[in-house]
């Protein structure tokens, strides 16, 4: 890049100096010979409208960040617990309700007698799953999402099944957590029920904007509501159990929106399994720690494994505790879509009454649920990016936006989650059947993959490690069958249909990418030499204009074998055109194609085919350059008025063999170069 | 790199920073950036390409040399990591010292910062050369020379 030079005087005559301009500095920085790094200014829009949009974007999403500005923060266990466990721990806010609302159909006695047993069974399952995932943390210190574990150890197809289930799971986490957070708000502010979709839109939009701004999993943002929820929930459990022990716990009268008591169904194994399947939603989000092992401080695997156990203990205690207190006070869930208080709010009320602590707990519950949605906003785009890098999703998903966030994944997740909330009218219970199936598919595949991993690696203690994972895998598979069968009619079938569809789409995309990669690949021994084929130029012209002259001059710079093609439906007009052309553009043959059927593109394509056929068969086919004159509109609205034929022509010609389509743009700023006193054809481009 | 203790930071509003692409550049740029940031001062990094008398002064030398551009671009990069803006100036002159003094004078700089590299060969010595003494004698402003640390075991 050659800059100008400006001589400057010195104090003495011999001290003159020359300041060398550095034209590249605003846009680039040299880092080596012929190696430049673009600065932010190089990506700045050039038009006023573009600059305005850029300013608005910067205001909403923040200034663009360079790749080097990425913060690789390592998390201590306390912060990591808050970040990775908000999804799992927050599920204790709605899991008890899911058990009670199944058992209630068997009448008060059924609901009250068996809810604790079901919750203990789920807590046992949680213990086994957590121990199994501890193994994943240790075996995959680089992050062992179900996709990676299943793909590496089982087969790519199982990886894709796990990835599909995970993608569904992440979408469901956003939808369910948001819906549940809104329910917590309406427990203290019933009027919020009427605006649940609007609140969901605002909250998802805020989380989306936050993530597009590159909101990192800042420990402090997560720590406050998560620990506030844990602390207050434990207070509720301790306070409730103390009242039970002291004998002051008594059945509360059902609230106005409560599900009517009275047996409509007999207590059966199926009903208990259904309650178990409903409550197993408490296990959602357990795998988040195993996915995020690299984010922990050293020793990553040990810290992650220990955090996993802490999370399981906290979740188990809160979940069983809330169920026990709900049982002791004979709490009955509200009717779906009634806008009544949630089970967890009613449980909180038994201990806190209507004190400020009650409201604080509801706020903390709503916040941890909103943050649980945010964990998906971290995980979904990352998984989509990994899938895109592996060729299973469109490549756009692996591109990071201005703020180093995977913008495509974030926007897609927000759109689908909000769509689901609208479709299911913001009802948690309607969404949950879709939730658990994907979760248990991931658990089963991940655990099965781990069994294979231990058998292959045969690390010390591999036998008992494989046993733990095998037990977890079998158990989660059984639960998967139970959850699928009992929730099938309530919407689980949608997931069963969706997973194979997603897998098929991903395989299709991968096949397309592999095929194009094969077609574009260059053999290692190939050396690119200058082209040996002849070149010819065809310029389709709509008349004789400055844009056409520009195109002719571009064509002249490509090859001496050039001709203009004028397609006309009027022979008289064509004759006039030829006369003018020969006078004003000498040396460039004009081919007139009369088109009595008024078609433009067809006759031009036919003419090109004829040219090809006329080429001597003993010579290699020439490269045909089609130079299309185009008028560059200055305003956005002008674009509608001009170049429509050129666009159509370009889109049709772009796939033609041995053909290169060249746009020769004419800008109005170039008017001065066409001095009316000088014949137009004499101008240089 | 440790920050310069505040008491030892010379106050300035605009400093000309002489860089030559040598090993001491990174050090002096960092020190200058820290001092400039503390004083909210402007920094102008100047790289002078000396033109032999056999060539005209306006000869197309520096503009064609990516090396010369790279020296200043590296300075920009270091300043960016220090969160300090820096203006970069590329000069061609017969004498580096005179060009630095004239540039500092024209820009109204109140500080001229230079590096003093340490030669490890032949038992170790400072390469004072002609530029530093010239700037000491002729600069209209304060001159801050940042000496490279002496390694404990000089390599022969």
Image (cartoon, coloured by chain):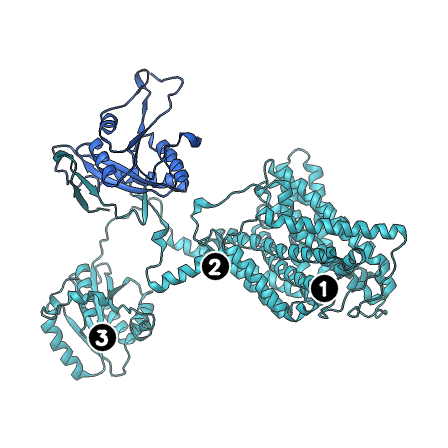
Chain colours: A cyan, B blue
Identify the residue position indicated by label 1 in the image.
A187
Mark 3 or 1: the one toward you: 1
Subunit bearing disc 3: A
Subunit bearing disc 2: A
Q: Do discs 2 and 1 share a chain?
A: yes
- The residues bearing labels 2 and 1 have C-alpha atoms spaced at a distance of 32 Å
Q: Where is B35 relative to A558, above or below?
A: above
The structure residue drawn at horizontal position 24% and vertical position 63%, both measured from the top left corner, is: A625
Q: Do discs 2 and 3 share a chain?
A: yes
First in sequence, mark 3 or 1: give its number.
1
Q: Quadrant of residue A496?
A: bottom right
Q: Where is A490 relative to A315, above or below?
A: below
Residue A243 is marked as none
Q: Secondary structure at mark 1?
A: helix
Identify the residue position indicated by label 3 in the image.
A542
Please identify the quadrant where the C terminus of chain A is shown. Answer: bottom left
Identify the residue position indicated by label 2 in the image.
A60
């Amino acid at each position: 890049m050659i800059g100008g030079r400006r001589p400057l005087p010195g104090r003495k005559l011999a001290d003159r100096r020359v300041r060398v301009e550095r034209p590249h500095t605003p846009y680039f920085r040299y880092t080596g010979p012929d190696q430049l790094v673009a600065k932010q200014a190089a990506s700045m829009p050039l038009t006023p409208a573009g600059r305005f949009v850029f300013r608005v974007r910067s205001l909403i999403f923040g200034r663009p960040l360079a790749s080097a500005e990425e913060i690789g923060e390592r998390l201590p266990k306390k912060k990591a617990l808050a970040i990775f466990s908000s999804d799992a721990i927050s599920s204790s806010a709605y899991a008890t309700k899911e058990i009670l609302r199944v058992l209630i159909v068997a009448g008060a006695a059924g609901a009250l007698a068996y809810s604790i047993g079901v919750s203990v069974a789920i807590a046992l399952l949680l213990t086994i799953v957590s121990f199994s995932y501890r193994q994943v943390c240790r075996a995959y210190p680089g992050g062992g999402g179900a996709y990676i574990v299943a793909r590496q150890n089982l087969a790519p197809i199982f990886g894709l099944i796990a990835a599909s289930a995970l993608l569904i799971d992440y979408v469901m986490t956003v939808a369910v957590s948001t819906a549940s957070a809104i329910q917590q708000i309406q427990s203290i502010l019933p009027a919020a029920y009427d605006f649940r979709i609007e609140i969901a839109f605002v909250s998802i939009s805020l989380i989306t904007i936050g993530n597009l701004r590159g909101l990192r999993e800042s420990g402090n943002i997560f720590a406050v509501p998560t620990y506030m929820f844990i602390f207050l929930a434990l207070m509720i459990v301790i306070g409730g159990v103390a009242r039970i022990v002291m004998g002051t716990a008594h059945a509360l009268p059902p609230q106005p929106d409560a599900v009517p008591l009275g047996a409509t169904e007999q207590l059966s194994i199926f009903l208990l399994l259904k309650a178990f399947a409903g409550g197993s939603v408490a296990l959602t989000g357990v795998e988040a720690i195993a996915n995020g092992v690299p984010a922990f401080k050293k020793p990553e695997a040990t810290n992650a494994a220990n955090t996993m156990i802490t999370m399981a203990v906290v979740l188990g205690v809160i979940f069983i505790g809330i169920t026990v207190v709900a049982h002791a006070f004979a709490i009955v869930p509200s009717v779906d879509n009634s806008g009544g208080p949630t089970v967890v709010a009613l449980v909180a009320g038994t201990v806190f009454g209507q004190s400020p602590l009650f409201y604080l707990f509801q706020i903390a519950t709503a916040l941890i649920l909103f943050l649980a949605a945010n964990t998906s906003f971290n995980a979904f785009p990352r998984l989509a990016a990994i899938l895109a890098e592996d060729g299973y999703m469109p490549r756009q998903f692996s591109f990071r936006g201005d703020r180093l966030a995977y913008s495509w994944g974030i926007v897609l997740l927000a759109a689908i989650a909000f769509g689901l909330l609208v479709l299911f009218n913001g009802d948690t219970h309607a969404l949950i059947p879709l939730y658990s199936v994907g979760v248990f598919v991931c658990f089963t595949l991940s655990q099965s993959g781990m069994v294979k991993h231990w058998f292959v690696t045969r690390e010390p203690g591999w036998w008992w490690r494989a046993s733990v994972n095998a037990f977890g895998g079998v158990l989660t598979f059984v639960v998967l069958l139970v959850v699928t069968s009992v929730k099938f009619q309530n919407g689980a079938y949608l997931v069963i249909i969706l997973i194979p569809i997603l897998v098929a789409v991903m395989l299709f995309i991968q096949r397309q990418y592999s095929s194009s990669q094969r077609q574009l690949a260059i053999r290692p021994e190939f050396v690119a030499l200058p082209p040996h084929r002849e070149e010819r130029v065809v310029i389709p012209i709509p008349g004789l204009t400055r844009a056409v002259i520009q195109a002719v001059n571009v064509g002249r710079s490509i090859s001496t074998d050039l001709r203009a093609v004028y397609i006309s439906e009027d022979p008289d007009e064509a004759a006039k055109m030829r006369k003018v052309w020969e006078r004003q553009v000498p040396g460039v043959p004009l081919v007139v194609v009369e088109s009595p059927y008024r078609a433009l593109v067809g006759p031009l394509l036919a003419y090109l085919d004829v040219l090809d056929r006329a080429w001597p068969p003993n010579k290699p086919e020439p490269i045909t350059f089609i130079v299309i004159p185009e008028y560059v509109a200055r305003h956005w609205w002008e674009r509608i008025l001009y170049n429509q034929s050129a666009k159509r022509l370009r889109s049709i010609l772009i796939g033609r063999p041995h053909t290169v389509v060249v746009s020769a743009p004419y800008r109005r700023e170039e008017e001065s170069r066409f001095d009316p006193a000088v014949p137009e054809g004499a101008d240089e481009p | 790199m440790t920050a310069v203790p505040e008491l030892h930071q010379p106050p300035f509003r605009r400093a000309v920073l002489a860089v030559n692409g040598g090993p001491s550049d990174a050090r002096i740029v960092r020190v200058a950036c820290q001092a400039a940031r503390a004083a909210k001062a402007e920094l102008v990094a100047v790289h002078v390409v000396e033109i032999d008398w056999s060539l005209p002064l306006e000869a197309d030398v520096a503009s064609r040399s990516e090396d010369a551009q790279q020296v200043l671009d590296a300075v920009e990069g270091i300043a960016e990591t220090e969160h300090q803006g820096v203006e970069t100036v590329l000069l061609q002159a017969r004498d580096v010292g005179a060009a630095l003094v004239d540039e500092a004078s024209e820009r109204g700089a109140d500080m001229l910062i230079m590096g003093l590299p340490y030669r490890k060969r032949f038992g170790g010595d400072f390469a004072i050369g002609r530029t530093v003494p010239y700037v000491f004698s002729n600069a209209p402003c304060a001159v801050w020379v940042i000496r490279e640390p002496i390694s404990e075991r000089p390599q022969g």
